[in-house]
């Protein structure tokens, strides 16, 4: 089944609203895009459209959280992590308030909206804030679980949603379990490990199939939580495979690749090859065309794995 993570998120809000009466939802005039429109229709008294005023929305949500509510703020990732960064830092994270900042339409797959809206810096911006949890679920099944996990997590968090519909894969993995701060091994392998987040998880699984035909066994790890990083799982992969490829719909600087490299350089140095946007802005085009132009494809991941294998001792 294909569903955009933003659509699954909208469904989850409605499904969980009765179980969690403290849940309130804020939007910045984008409910039709962020998919909070369903919640607005079902629970109008718990929905607040703040207009095109993201900084104000963030501050109001921070205030409401001090009254016992669990606010989820919603806008595009470029505005949630970029425009409102100061308010997220000072009004939510600094006093450690229980607000969930949700950035929809993250990454290059926003497509035709172009570079100004293709946020490829949000992981880095949010990771740099002390105490901020950062996550990026890969599919609809994982998104439903992530929303409920956030409702049970007391503290500030940032979650990225995607615009495009993606294949649901985690529901078919035997033994799959979602837990904040813990990655999930979706497929095993001994030659190399791919650590992926968001829509790159599905592409990593496709890359694994291509490489298997070449006799290369690749482990695929779904790292939905980028901060705190599941360092135990990363180290285990490094020890058992000897090389790592990270893949993300984000700048190679400051995101998942940065987090993995920072940890392994100190704890267990092995070759780490980062796959993502190579420190350049996006461009306008269909989602598929843009991802292809930047090498964010299964073949692109395969190239990085082959390169990583040449670096193994």
Image (tube, grey):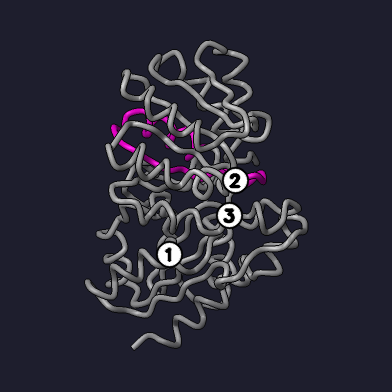
Does 205 sit above or below residue 60? below
234 displayed left or right of 110: left
Residue found 47% across the figure and 48% down from its top: 136
Q: Position of residue 179 (x, y in %)?
A: 33, 41
* Foreground: disc 2 or disc 1: 1
Marks 3 and 1, how far apart at CA: 13 Å
Mark 3 highlights which residue? 119
Image quadrant containing the N terminus? top right
- Of labels 3 and 1, earlier in sequence is 3
Instruction: Find numbered disc 3 in the image and state the secondary structure of the residue it sits on.
Output: loop
Mark 2 highlights which residue? 162
Mark 1 highlights which residue? 254
How packed mark 3 is, by other alpha carbons closer than 10 Å (few <14, some 14-19, many 20 or more), is many
Instruction: State the extent of the magenta-drawn residues as a range.
Output: 141-168
- Of labels 2 and 1, earlier in sequence is 2
Q: Position of residue 216 (x, y in %)?
A: 49, 76
> Which quadrant of the figure has residue 294?
bottom right
């Amino acid at each position: 089944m294909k569903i955009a993570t933003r659509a699954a998120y909208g469904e989850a809000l409605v499904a969980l609203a009765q179980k969690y009466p403290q849940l309130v939802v804020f939007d910045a005039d984008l409910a039709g895009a962020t998919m909070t429109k369903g919640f607005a229709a079902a629970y109008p008294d718990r929905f607040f459209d703040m207009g095109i005023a993201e900084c104000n929305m963030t501050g109001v949500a921070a205030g409401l959280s001090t009254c016992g509510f669990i606010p989820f703020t919603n806008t595009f990732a470029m505005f949630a992590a970029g425009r409102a960064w100061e308010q997220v830092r000072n009004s939510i994270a600094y006093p450690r308030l229980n607000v969930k900042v949700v950035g929809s339409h993250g990454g290059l797959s926003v497509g035709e909206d172009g570079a100004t809206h293709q946020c490829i810096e949000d992981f880095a911006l949010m990771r740099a804030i002390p105490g901020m949890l950062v996550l990026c679920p890969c599919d609809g099944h994982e998104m439903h679980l992530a929303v409920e996990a956030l409702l049970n997590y007391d503290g500030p968090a940032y979650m990225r949603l995607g615009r495009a519909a993606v294949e649901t894969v985690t529901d078919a993995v035997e033994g799959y379990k979602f837990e904040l701060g813990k990655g999930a091994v979706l497929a095993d392998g001994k030659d190399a490990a791919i650590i992926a987040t968001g829509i790159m998880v599905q592409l990593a699984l496709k890359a694994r199939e291509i490489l298997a035909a070449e006799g290369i066994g690749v482990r695929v790890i779904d790292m939905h939580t980028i901060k705190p990083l599941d360092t135990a799982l990363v180290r285990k992969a490094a020890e058992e495979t000897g090389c790592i490829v990270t893949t993300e719909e984000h700048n190679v600087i400051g995101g998942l690749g940065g987090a993995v490299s920072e940890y392994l350089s100190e704890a267990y140095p092995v070759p780490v090859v980062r796959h993502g946007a190579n420190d350049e802005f996006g461009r306008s085009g269909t989602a598929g065309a843009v991802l292809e132009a930047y090498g964010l494809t299964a073949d692109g991941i395969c190239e990085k794995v082959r390169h990583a294998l040449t670096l193994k001792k």
